[in-house]
Amino acid sequence: MNSIRFISNALAKKHSNGKFHPESPQRIEIMEKWVTSHLDDSISFEISHEMANKDEILSVHTEDHYNLIEKTKNYEGHFYFDADTAANSYSYEAAMQAVQIGIQAVSESTMDTSVFCLVRPPGHHATQHSPQGFCIFNNIAVGSQIALNKKKYSRIAILDFDHHFGNGTAYITESNPDILYISTHADPRISYPGCGFSDEIGLGEGRGFNVPLPLGYRASEADLKLCFESIINPIIYQFKPDFLAISAGFDAYERDPIGVLGVTVNGFGYIGKIIKEITDNLKIPYAHFLEGGYNINLLPELLSAYVSPFIGKSEVIMKIDPSLQVKEETKSTVQSSKNVLKDYWSL
Ligand SMILES: [Zn+2]
């Protein structure tokens, strides 16, 4: 029997980027409501007050970055790191709690029971030295790095299906061959953060271990399917991770207010299903980290579709609608990825 442990940080709903910001406390409120109304043998929910410690943050972030965030706890109103990322007096502790849940998720998830970090702030845009893109600390990178440092795992794959390229995760891991970072995201020419082209495959010893897969306007699960079959699955099976960490963003949804992609509700069921197949085939544990997703009313439906395959439920039809066509741009991304990655993986 497979189950999911949702863990939310106690201050998730207190952290704020300012009024009318899409990354709002309502995102957690509505998802928590869905989770708590579906509690059974396969779904559990916990609220955690624990915070990561400074040394854990410093496993991937600079001391200046940590100090900047810590200072905001005494700030009245909103402290703006950039035009779209801010902190209020709760944000430092909320972010430290979110990281702690990430560390716990990598350490405690098993093949049968995965942890879903139902946290705010999200993390995948936070780089070594700066908060950005609604993110303060990089929850998934810290969680993964701590598990590697403790020799709990020796090779971790991070799969990021958020609408946006996780530039923070990519920069943090780009020289590290022990972390494979694979991301599907909207074309950087039309979307934040403006990087994540298919030739950004890592540096030095880590070259070949960053795999950005940019997708064109309105790309759907048909495009994701081509990416999984041609690039993602072959690389993950050759890398043979002993843990899979998933940056789960729901802003690739076709009606997301800030997105340009075209993934349907069923598409999130497809993503869950294919990830579950990978972890089953490799017989490895895995954990989910909430990143973006801004269509407040539809978030519960997207979450439900995504988690169903992990708890043996088929509330959604996980077949891909044949009317969804693979975009030309996706075919060209797959071709460029094959060209640039051919020295590192057999594709
Ligand atoms: Zn996003």
Image (cartoon, rainbow, N blue to C red):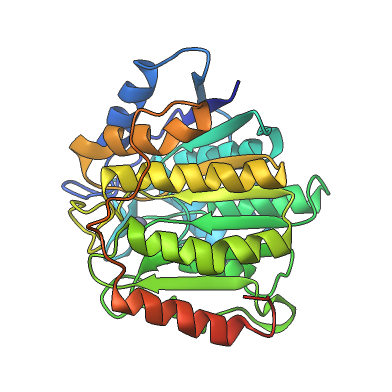
In the depicted structure, whether residue 252 falls above or below residue 150:
below
> In the image as oriented, which residue stretches furthest toward the top?
40
In the picture, residue 115 is in which quadrant?
top right
**Residue situated in front as seen by the camera: 275 or 151:** 275
Q: Is residue 339 left or right of residue 261?
A: right
Q: In this view, does 301 lie to the left or right of 271?
A: left
Percent from the top left, x then y, of residue 243?
A: 69, 48
**Residue situated in front as seen by the camera: 240 or 205:** 240
Percent from the top left, x then y, of residue 244?
A: 63, 49
In the depicted structure, whether residue 297 falls above or below residue 125:
above
In the picture, residue 185 is in which quadrant?
bottom left
In the depicted structure, whether residue 114 falls above or below residue 265:
above
**Residue situated in front as seen by the camera: 40 or 327:** 327
Q: Which residue is drawn at 24% across and 70% down?
A: 217
Q: Can residue 70 be seen in this view?
A: yes
Q: In this view, does 168 lie to the left or right of 105?
A: left
Percent from the top left, x then y, of residue 238?
A: 71, 64
Q: Is residue 156 left or right of residue 46?
A: right
Q: Residue at x 25, y 76 (%)?
A: 190
- Location of the N terminus (image quadrant): top right
Ligand 1 picture quarter: bottom left
> In the image as oriented, which residue stretches furthest toward the front?
322
Q: Can residue 169 be seen in this view?
A: no
Q: Which residue is drawn at 30% across and 29% down?
A: 29
- Location of the C terminus (image quadrant): bottom right
Percent from the top left, x then y, of residue 141?
A: 60, 56
